[in-house]
Image (cartoon, grey):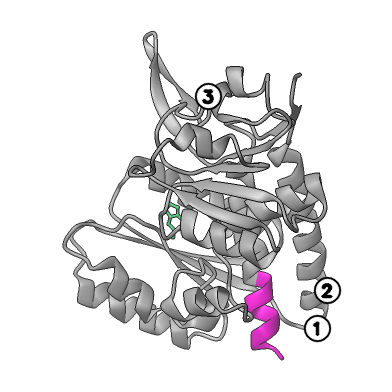
C-alpha cells in the first residue's frame, strides 16, 4: 500500500483564504484584526518563524506588530511590553516566540498575556478551558493537526489515537483535542513500554517528539493515518535536510494517509494562528 499524502501546504492556503475573507468583512465594519509577535534574541529558527508570521499576517489583510528585542532584555521589560500590548485595543492577538533566553521565566511571560489575546493558547486559563471542554484559545499546531485529521477521516469518534510526545505545546493539547472529538487517546513518551506495539494499535498516530525519523513502518498499523509534527535538521552530505519524526519513506508504504515534512503540519500552524487572531478579534468586538 502507498499512503495518500496529506497536503498541508494546500490546506493551509485554503484556511488563509477563508481567514482573508473574514478579515475583509471585519474591515468593512471598520475593524482590523491585529497580531503582535514578540521575539527576544536572535535564535535563527525563531527569526524565520517570526518573519513568516509577519508576512502572512499582512497577506490576509491584518495588522502586524513585530517587537524584536535584544537577547539581554530583562524579564521586567518584557513583562512591561506585554502589559502595553494587553492594553492596546489595536492588538487582538499576542504571541511571544519560544524559547526565550534562560534569564527569562517563560511561564511568567505566558501568564502575563491576557487570556483573551493568547492566540497561542498557552495561558493556564486556556489550558484549563480546553481540558474542561469549554471555549478556549487552542494551540495552533495541534489545531492544524486536528483540522487535517477531520478532513481526512470525518468523525474521529471511537478511533484509537496515540500521541507520541507529551509537550505542553503539542502533545498534551493534541490529546485533549482528540479526546474532545471522542477518540480513545493514549499519550506515549520516552518511558512508555513497547512503544512500537502501542503505536501499532492506533488508527491515528501523531508524532511530536523531536527525534528524527523515529517512527518507522513497523510502528504503523496498515491503513492508519499518520501526522508528523517533527521538524528536524539532519546532515545531508555537505548540507542539511529537513525530516520529520516519522521515517516517511518506510511509513508511507504502510499508512493509509500521512503528512510529509516539509509541507504537512508546518504550514498549518501559521494558518491556525491567523484564524485564532480573527477569533480573538471577533470575541473582543462582541
Ligand atoms: N516555538 C515553537 N513553536 C511555537 C509556537 O507554536 N508558539 C510560540 N509562541 N513559540 C513557539
Q: Could you say which quadrant of the image residue 226 lies in? A: top right
Residues rendered magenta in the picture: 278-286
| x then y, percent, for residue 66 | 46, 62
Mark 3 or 2, nearer chain start: 2
Q: CA distance from mark 1 to mark 3?
A: 51 Å
Q: Could you say which quadrant of the image residue 185 lies in? A: bottom right
Drawn side of residue 107 relative to residue 174, left or right: left
Q: Which residue is mark 1?
A: 29
Image quadrant occupied by the N terminus:
top right
Task: State whether residue 57 appears in this view.
Answer: no
Task: State whether residue 268 appears in this view.
Answer: yes
- Within-10-Å neighbours for mark 1: few <14, some 14–19, many 20+: few
Depth check, mark 3 against mark 2: the one in front is 3
Q: Which residue is mark 3?
A: 216
Residue at horizontal 36 percent and vertical 80 percent from the top: 112
| x then y, percent, for residue 203 | 68, 42
Residue at horizontal 68 percent and vertical 71 percent from the top: 278
Q: Is residue 167 above or below residue 26?
A: above
Q: Could you say which quadrant of the image residue 155 lies in? A: bottom right
Q: Is residue 193 above or below residue 149?
A: above
Ligand 1: give its quadrant: bottom left
Image quadrant occupied by the C terminus:
bottom right
Circles 1 and 2, Cβ within 8 Å, touching? The answer is yes
Tell me the element at label 2.
Answer: helix
Drawn side of residue 39 relative to residue 260, left or right: left
Badge number at residue 259: none
Circles 1 and 3, Cβ within 8 Å, touching? The answer is no
Tell me the element at label 3.
Answer: loop
Q: Is residue 20 above or below residue 33?
A: above
Depth check, mark 1 against mark 3: the one in front is 3
Q: Which residue is mark 2?
A: 25
Residue at horizontal 71 percent and vertical 51 percent from the top: 159
Amino acid at each position: 500500500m502507498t499512503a495518500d499524502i496529506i497536503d498541508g501546504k494546500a490546506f493551509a492556503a485554503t484556511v488563509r483564504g477563508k481567514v482573508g475573507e473574514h478579515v475583509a468583512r471585519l474591515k468593512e465594519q471598520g475593524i482590523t484584526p491585529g497580531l503582535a509577535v514578540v521575539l527576544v534574541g536572535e535564535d535563527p529558527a525563531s527569526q524565520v518563524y517570526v518573519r513568516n508570521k509577519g508576512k502572512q499576517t499582512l497577506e490576509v489583510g491584518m495588522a502586524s506588530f513585530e517587537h524584536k528585542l535584544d537577547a539581554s532584555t530583562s524579564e521586567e521589560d518584557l513583562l512591561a511590553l506585554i502589559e502595553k500590548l494587553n492594553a492596546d485595543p489595536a492588538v487582538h492577538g499576542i504571541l511571544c516566540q519560544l524559547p526565550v533566553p534562560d534569564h527569562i521565566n517563560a511561564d511568567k511571560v505566558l501568564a502575563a498575556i491576557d487570556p483573551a489575546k493568547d492566540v497561542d493558547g498557552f495561558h493556564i486559563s486556556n489550558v484549563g478551558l480546553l481540558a474542561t471542554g469549554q471555549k478556549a484559545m487552542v494551540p495552533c499546531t495541534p489545531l492544524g493537526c486536528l483540522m487535517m485529521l477531520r478532513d481526512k477521516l470525518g468523525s474521529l469518534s471511537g478511533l484509537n489515537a496515540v500521541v507520541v510526545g507529551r509537550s505542553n505545546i503539542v502533545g498534551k493539547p493534541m490529546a485533549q483535542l482528540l479526546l474532545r472529538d471522542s477518540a480513545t487517546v493514549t499519550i506515549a513518551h520516552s518511558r512508555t513500554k513497547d512503544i512500537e506495539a502501542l503505536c501499532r494499535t492506533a488508527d491515528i498516530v501523531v508524532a511530536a517528539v523531536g527525534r528524527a525519523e523515529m517512527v518507522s513502518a513497523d510502528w504503523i498499523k496498515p491503513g492508519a493515518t499518520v501526522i508528523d509534527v517533527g521538524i528536524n535538521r539532519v546532515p545531508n552530505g555537505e548540507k542539511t535536510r529537513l525530516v520529520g519524526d516519522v521515517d516517511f519513506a518506510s511509513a508511507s508504504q504502510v499508512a493509509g494517509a500521512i503528512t510529509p515534512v516539509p509541507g504537512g503540519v508546518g504550514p498549518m500552524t501559521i494558518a491556525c494562528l491567523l484564524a485564532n487572531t480573527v477569533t480573538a478579534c471577533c470575541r473582543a468586538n462582541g
